[in-house]
Amino acid sequence: MEKPTKRILSGVQPSGDLHLGNYLGAIKNFVSLQEEYECFFCVVDLHAITVWQDPKVLANKTREVTAAFIASGINPNKNNIFVQSQVPQHAQLGWLFNCVARMGWLNRMTQFKDKAGKNSENVSVGLFSYPTLMAADILIYLATHVPVGDDQKQHLELTRDIAQKFNNDFKTDFFPIPEPLIFGEATRVMSLRDGSKKMSKSDPSDYSRIMLTDSAEKISQKIKKAKTDPLPLPDNLDDLKSRSEALNLISIFASLHDTSLEKIVAEYAGKEFSLFKRDLVDLAVSKLEPITSEMNKIMDDQEYLESVLNNGKESAISVAEPVLAKTKEIIGFLS
C-alpha cells in the first residue's frame, strides 16, 4: 500500500449553527490547505451525538456544514467532502483503537473534564472515548498532518500515542505519526462577552458569538456591543496579551485580514475602540456576507448537496477500506 506524504484529515461538528470561531479556527484554514495537500474534510456527526441531538436538526446541520465548506471556498471536485457516519470504517477502526488506548491516557483529557464537569458519572461513554474515534478519523486515511486549534492539541497527541503503541505492539510502521498544523492569528476565537471563554454555540448570550448566518446588521450590532476595557488600544504585543478582550478582537481582525497581530497593533495603537470596531464591522461583513449568501444558495439545492456527499463518501471509502483491511490483517483477524 502506497503511503501518502501530504494528506490532511479534519472535520467540523454539525451540533449547532456555525459561528466565527468555526470559520477562523477551522474552515478558513481548510481553504488554504487544499492547494498543497490531499484533503479529507468530514462532517463529524458521530462526534456530535456524544451529547443528545434532535434528529431533524442534526440532519439539517449536517447539510449546513457541508454548504459552509463549499461556500467558504473548498472545491468539492478537488477535495473529499463527506459525512463521517456514512463511512463505517471510522467507527470500526475506532473500536480497534479503544483496545489500544489506555484508560490513563483518556483520564488525562482535559476537554472531557471541562465538558463533563461535576456530572462525569452521567455523561455518555462516547464523550469519554471521543479521542479514540478522533484518532480513527485521522489514521483511517493514514493522514500525515492535522490542522488543530489550541484545544485539540491534546487529542492529536493521543492520536500520535495510539499510532506509536499500535506500531510497537505489532512491530510495524503501518500508521504514520501525524503532525499538527496550527494557523493564523485566531486559532482560538473567544467570546465577544468574555475574552477568557471560548466562543461557543452553548453560551446563553447571542451577543457572545457571530454566526455565519448573521445578517450584516446583526454582525454590526454584535461587534459594537463586544466587551472591551476602558483604555485605548495597546501599542505593543506584551500589553495586548494582558488584555483578553482587546486581544480577541485584534486577533479576529488580523485573521480576517490575513495579516499579523503586530501590523494591526501598529495601525491602531492608542486609538479608541469605537474606531477600531467600526473598521472591524466593515471587514467582517465584507468577508462573511458572501459566504452566508452562497451557503443559502447551496442549501436551496439539495440535489447538488447530496451529489457532493455521495461522491465524497465513495471516495473516502475507497481509501479507508484498504487501510481497515490491512489493520485487521496486522492484528490477526480472519479476512
Image (tube, rainbow, N blue to C red):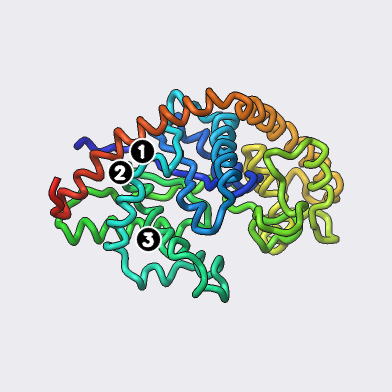
333 to the left or right of 145: left
| 56 or 81: nearer the viewer | 56
Q: Name the residue under label 2.
A: 142
Q: How far apart are marks 3 and 2 (CA)?
A: 15 Å
SS at mark 2 in the image: loop
Q: Which amino acid does label 3 sit on?
A: Leu
Within 10 Å of disc 1 (Cα), the crowding (few <14, some 14-19, many 20+) is many
Crowding near the residue tagged with mark 2, few <14, some 14–19, many ≥20 C-alpha atoms within 10 Å: many
Residue behind mark 1: 7
Please indicate whether residue 283 sits to the left or right of residue 198 in the image. Answer: right
Q: Element under label 3?
A: helix
* Mark positioned earlier in the residue sequence (3 or 2): 2
User: On the image, numbered disc 3 is attached to which residue?
Assistant: 158
Q: Are marks 2 and 1 in contact (CB under 8 Å)?
A: yes
Under mark 2, the amino acid is Leu
Q: Residue at x 52, y 33 (%)?
A: 31
Q: Is residue 26 left or right of residue 220?
A: left
Disc 1 or 3, which lies upstream in sequence?
Answer: 1
Q: Position of residue 206 (x, y in %)?
A: 76, 52
- Counting other residues with Cα less than 10 Å from the Cα at mark 3, is it few (<14), some (14-19), or many (20 or more)? many
Q: Where is residue 330 in the image (x, y as percent from the top left)?
A: 16, 51
Residue at 47% from the left image edge and 52% from the top image edge: 47
**Residue at disc 1, secondary structure:** strand
Measured from the top left, where is residue 33 in percent x and y? Answer: 47, 35
Is 69 situated above or below 169? above
**Residue at screen point 45% across, 44% down:** 10
Q: Nearer the viewer, residue 72 or 281?
A: 72
Residue 335 is situated, as x and y percent measured from the top left of the image, at: 14, 45
The residue shown at (36%, 31%) is 314
